[in-house]
Image (cartoon, rainbow, N blue to C red):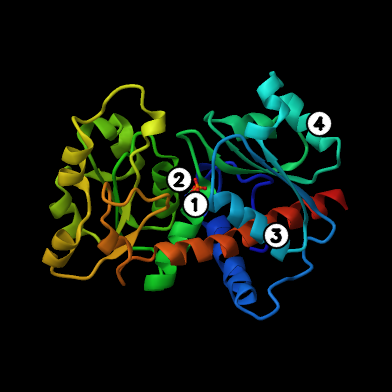
């Protein structure tokens, strides 16, 4: 397969295993490119990309911008906090104004689940979802699975544990879709109140005891508690959360094997993970960030190729 089955990347739910493997193979090439002394290629020289961030971001935003620049695209950046959205402009009006400036691709982060799906139905540009509320964060899941593939050679058959606030996490949902499509075994762990009741219908198992869950896994992906998406308390105190679901060196060292530790960031050190674990040799958190650039280059390149093919 040499092209993606989709015109947009709206979620992992909407792509297939062949799409994911094509993105990984393309990312292998771009990872080699970004480690050369000359890190730039002319692949997207005629493409203009708008990064629309209606919600805060550090990693995703920088990673997309770097990926676009490494591919020689023209890039415009939009941040809701400094835009006319503050004056009451709607999402569709904002985007239509930006598209009038002849933008080919839109990378969008928005707090509303489904915002990028909505946009894809109203505009012709290729849309990449950079995180929509508690729904999906597809490029994060791709870079996470790619990082697991890099560690083990393949994702199929590996035991992957996702720990924390599963209920509010777009990273958890996109990871579950990606890992299951790639043939991994997936377990989630966290307070019962932060695990959606329907989660087992996605083919994952649930373990409420962190030590037991860690003993099962090859990789533990530790998630942040998404306080910004909570309107009520889901657990008594942060201290109790950390005692039951925080990963520290003592638990890690008590396991009879060395597991890989992942975190999508931003990290709340001392809450879901202690500093000595986050900075340990077992943690691949910064490898994930590096892989994020290669994965986003691959996604941009493959979607742009599709766009150019449809135009010809
Ligand atoms: N992992 C992630 O999405 O981080 P940012 O919110 O900083 O983009």
Q: Is residue 172 visible?
A: yes
At horizontal 33% and vertical 39% (from top left) the residue drawn is: 225
Q: Is residue 182 above or below residue 239?
A: below
For residue 97, the mark is 4
Marks 3/2: CA–CA distance: 21 Å
Q: Which residue is mark 1?
A: 140
Mark 1 residue's CB less than 8 Å from ligand 1? yes
N-terminal of the pair, mark 1 or mark 3, is 1
Which of discs 3 and 4 lies nearer the camera? The answer is: 4
Residue occupying the far top of the picture: 88
Marks 1/3: CA–CA distance: 17 Å
Does dot 3 land on a helix, a strand or a loop?
A: helix
Q: Residues within 10 Å of mark 1 (few under 14, many from 20)?
A: many
The percent position of residue 7, horizontal first and vertical second, equals: 69, 46
Does dot 4 land on a helix, a strand or a loop?
A: helix
N-terminal of the pair, mark 3 or mark 2, is 2
N-terminal of the pair, mark 3 or mark 4, is 4
Horizontal side of 263 relative to 195 (left or right) equals right
Q: Are marks 1 and 2 in contact (CB under 8 Å)?
A: yes
The percent position of residue 169, horizontal first and vertical second, equals: 40, 39
């Amino acid at each position: 397969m040499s092209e993606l089955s989709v015109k947009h990347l709206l979620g992992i739910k909407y792509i297939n295993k062949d799409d994911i493997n094509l993105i990984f193979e393309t990312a292998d090439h771009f990872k080699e490119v970004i480690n050369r002394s000359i890190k730039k290629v002319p692949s997207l020289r005629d493409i203009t990309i708008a990064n629309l961030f209606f919600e805060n971001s550090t990693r995703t935003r920088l990673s997309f911008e770097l990926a676009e620049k490494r591919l020689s695209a023209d890039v415009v950046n939009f941040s809701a906090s400094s835009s006319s959205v503050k004056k009451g402009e709607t999402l569709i009006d904002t985007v239509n104004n930006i598209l009038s400036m002849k933008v080919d691709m839109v990378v969008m982060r928005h707090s509303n689940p489904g915002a990028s799906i909505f946009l894809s139905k109203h505009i012709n540009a290729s849309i990449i979802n950079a995180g929509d509320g508690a729904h999906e964060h597809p490029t994060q899941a791709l870079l996470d699975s790619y990082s697991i593939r890099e560690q083990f050679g393949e994702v199929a058959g590996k035991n992957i544990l996702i720990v924390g606030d599963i209920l509010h996490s777009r990273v958890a949902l996109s990871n579950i879709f990606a890992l299951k499509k790639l043939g991994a075994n997936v377990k989630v762990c966290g307070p019962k109140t932060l695990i959606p009741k329907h989660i087992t219908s996605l083919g994952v198992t649930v373990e409420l005891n962190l030590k037991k869950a860690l003993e099962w896994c090859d990789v533990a992906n530790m998630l942040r508690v998404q306080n910004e998406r909570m309107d009520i308390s889901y657990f008594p105190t942060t201290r109790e959360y950390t005692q039951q679901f925080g990963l520290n060196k003592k638990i890690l060292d008590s396991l009879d094997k060395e597991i890989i530790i992942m975190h999508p960031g931003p990290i709340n050190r001392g809450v879901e993970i202690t500093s000595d674990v986050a900075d340990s040799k077992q943690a691949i958190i910064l490898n994930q960030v590096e892989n994020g650039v290669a994965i986003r280059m691959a996604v941009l390149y493959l979607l742009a190729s599709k766009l150019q093919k449809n135009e010809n």
